[in-house]
Amino acid sequence: MHNAPFLIEPAVSEELLVQSSLTLDLLRVNQGKIVTAESCTGGLVAAALTHHAGSSDVTEGGFVTYSNLMKQVVLGVRETTLVQYGAVSAETVSEMAEGALRMAPDATVAVSVSGIAGPSGGSVSKPVGLVWFATAVRNGPTVSDAQNFAGDRTRVRSLAALHALLLVGQRLERE
């Protein structure tokens, strides 16, 4: 029996905490609320947002849909989308973000992330480090973006979470 709790080293970097704080501020200024739909980041975006006291005023929650089945069941991603384009695609992240908005009726913006964090699982067309993102808003278009991140699994996940928050910030500034 352990006397002290077992702790996993946090993957939330200082840079991610700064960006999540800025994102929360932008949400407040825009009277918005966010919901997340994450695959390869495993809840890291939501963890960064909810790290800050008071974040519940603009954070609705998040979905970690790691498997294709969970993407379908929880977020309504179509099986045909997953078969035709794969989990790591513009089409899938768009459906993930739109599904998250449907599941969180008070949210005004959703961000989704799906990628290949590594060290295995990549291919020639979808290498390790490839991450797709989407932002969705009510009564507006869903916008997707892809990035290729270099580094180990922890770095890819951290950079993906950071980029997701940057995209939310850019989207809020445009709306």
Image (cartoon, helix red, strand yellow):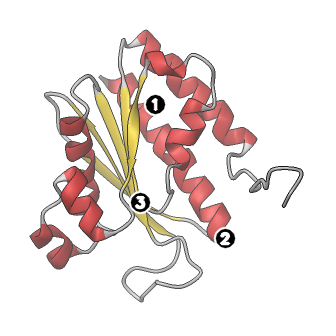
Q: Which residue ends up furthest to the right in the rendered image?
A: 3
Residue linked to disc 3: 39
Q: How many marks?
A: 3
Q: Is residue 60 above or below residue 130?
A: above
Residue at point 74%, 39% (across, down): 14
Q: Which mark is drawn over residue 169?
A: 1
The kind of residue on which mark 1 rests is Gly
How far separated are the C-alphas under marks 2 and 1?
24 Å
The three-letter amino acid code for the residue at tag 2 is: Gly
Mark pair 2, 3: CA separation = 18 Å
Residue 138, quarter of the rendered image: top left
In the image, is 26 to the left or to the right of 15?
Answer: left
x, y percentage for residue 132?
Answer: 38, 60
Helix or strand or loop: what does disc 3 sit on? loop
Discs 3/1, front: 3
Residue 78 placement (x, y as % from top left): 12, 63
Q: Marks 1 and 2: in contact by CB < 8 Å?
A: no
x, y percent for residue 160: 53, 55
